[in-house]
Image: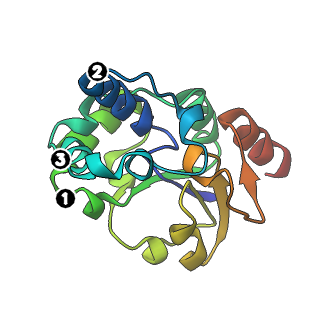
Amino acid sequence: MVRIAVDMDEVIADFTAKLLSIYNKKYGTSYTEKDLVGKNLRDVHPEHAEYIRKVIQQSDYFADLPLMKGAREALEKLSEKHEIFITTAAMDFPTSFNAKYAWLRENFPFISDRNYVFCGDKSIISADYLIDDHLRHLKKFKGQGILFTAYHNINDSYEMRMDSWEEIYNYFESNY
């Protein structure tokens, strides 16, 4: 049985879709993730960085994030053969615990809440694989990292990158 640690934001939860929706409504813009290739919204509009920070630090911001396409189905199938842990750097958003916990319970009821890891530094995670969208977490991870493609990391190089949950599922199904 393989132990797979999975990040939450931009891997199973579409953090950016909600942020863009809120931002576009406030500023009358029509940004999509394609407009952010290789960067974050705060890089595009540094003059609004404080507003963006306030939005994502609201305690309920994470309560209703959309699911990433195929995440629930792939993880449900993978959980039949493997140990799945959700590992979120919740210390980046300290007020997010309750909303993230409730979101996980609602969207991934087949994963025990005993398998939720709320942390800051993911180098403490003991797993065979870590699926994450940030290189900073993968660089310190002792197992095999998988960079999950997101708008902000499209220009980053990493030995093992996957673009979708279908690709991730097929990888584990073929190799284990």
Q: How far is disc 3 from disc 1 in space, using C-alphas?
A: 13 Å
Q: How far is disc 1 from disc 2 in space, using C-alphas?
A: 26 Å
Q: Reply above or below: 19 against 138.
A: above
Dot 2: element: helix
Badge 3: residue crowd in 10 Å (few <14, some 14–19, many ≥20): few
User: Are discs 2 and 3 less than 8 Å apart at CB?
Assistant: no
Q: Reply above or below: 98 against 74.
A: below
Nearer-N-terminus badge (3/1): 3
Residue matched to label 2: 25
Residue matched to label 1: 94
Tell me if 159 is positioned left or right of 123 in this view. right
Q: Amino acid at mark 2?
A: Lys
Q: Which residue is rendered at x = 60% and y = 27% of the image?
A: 70
Nearer-N-terminus badge (2/3): 2
Q: Quadrant of residue 14?
A: top left
Q: Please provide percent x and percent y for residue 2.
A: 65, 58
Q: Amino acid at mark 1?
A: Pro
Dot 3: element: helix
Residue matched to label 3: 54
Residue nearer the viewer, 19 or 141: 19
Badge 1: residue crowd in 10 Å (few <14, some 14–19, many ≥20): some
Dot in front, 3 or 1: 3
Tell me if 98 is positioned left or right of 105 in this view. left
Q: Amino acid at mark 3?
A: Lys
Q: Reply above or below: 30 against 47.
A: above
Q: Which residue is rendered at x = 42% and y = 33% of the image?
A: 108
Dot in front, 2 or 3: 2
